[in-house]
């Protein structure tokens, strides 16, 4: 039988949550989603897509896979490391729940980088199709942010 840590369980004597079957943890997540409003589910999906895009982009920048493209856009070599780390920190900030202002900053910083990415492509004369991924991601980000604020009212 496969085991995983329970979500939001009372701590054991050792300060650790008890072990529960993995299907019970999955059932708890599915129950939470079933109780969520459709707007909340859409918001979570959109935020998850944006987080996945930034996670992949961050890793690609840190591994050097984006070096040629970033150089073509006119950015210095060290920029990939900075932006890769920033993207990963942004993803972490989206999912931390202790400090709401960090989530706000993450949404804002991600929006700025996406506008910068689209603008960089257009500034060097690339066709709009080269800027389209940043524009589409920006739309997803703005939709997730708007739904997040709608749910907080």
Image (cartoon, rainbow, N blue to C red):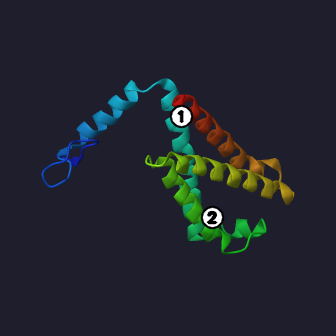
Whether residue 65 is visible here, answered yes or no, is no
Q: Which mark is residue 134?
A: none
Q: Check if mark 2's residue and mark 1's residue have beta carbons within 8 Å.
A: no
Q: Residue at left 54%, top 28%?
A: 153
The residue most toward the left is 13
Percent x, y of residue 83: 63, 64
Query: Between residues 111 and 134, which one lies in front from this camera angle?
Result: 111
Q: Residue at x 74, y 55 (%)?
A: 116
Q: Nearer the viewer, residue 7 or 66?
A: 7
Q: Is residue 82 above or below residue 46?
A: below
Number of disc labels = 2
Residue 134 x/y as whole percent: 70, 49
Label 2 vs 1, first from the N-terminus: 1
Residue at the extreme bottom of the image, as rendered: 77
Is residue 140 rendered to the left or right of residue 26? right
Could you say which quadrant of the image residue 58 lies in?
Answer: bottom right
Q: Is residue 124 above or below residue 140?
A: below
Q: Is residue 46 visible to the viewer in this orientation of the structure?
A: yes
Q: Position of residue 128 (x, y in %)?
A: 81, 48
User: On the image, which quarter does residue 22 sit in?
Assistant: top left
Residue under circle 1?
A: 43
The kind of secondary structure element at disc 2 is: helix
Near mark 1 (Cα within 10 A), the count class, few <14, some 14-19 or many ≥20, is many
Residue at position x 30%, y 38% in the image: 26
Disc 2: which residue: 83
Relative to 89, residue 9 above or below: above
- Give the distance between the C-alpha atoms of the residues marked 2 and 1, in whole angstroms: 25 Å
């Amino acid at each position: 039988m496969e085991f995983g840590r329970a979500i939001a369980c009372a701590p054991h004597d050792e300060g650790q949550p008890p072990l529960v079957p993995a299907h019970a943890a999955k059932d708890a997540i599915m129950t939470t989603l079933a109780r969520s409003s459709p707007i909340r589910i859409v918001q979570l999906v959109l935020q998850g897509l944006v987080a996945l895009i930034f996670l992949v982009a961050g890793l690609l920048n840190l591994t050097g896979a984006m070096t040629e493209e970033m150089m073509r856009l006119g950015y210095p070599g060290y920029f990939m490391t900075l932006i890769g780390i920033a993207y990963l920190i942004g993803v972490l900030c989206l999912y931390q729940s202790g400090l709401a202002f960090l989530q706000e900053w993450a949404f804002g910083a991600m929006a700025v980088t996406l506008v910068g990415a689209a603008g960089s492509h257009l500034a060097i004369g690339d066709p709009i199709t080269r800027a389209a991924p940043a524009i589409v991601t920006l739309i997803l980000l703005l939709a997730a942010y708007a739904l997040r604020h709608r749910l907080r009212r």
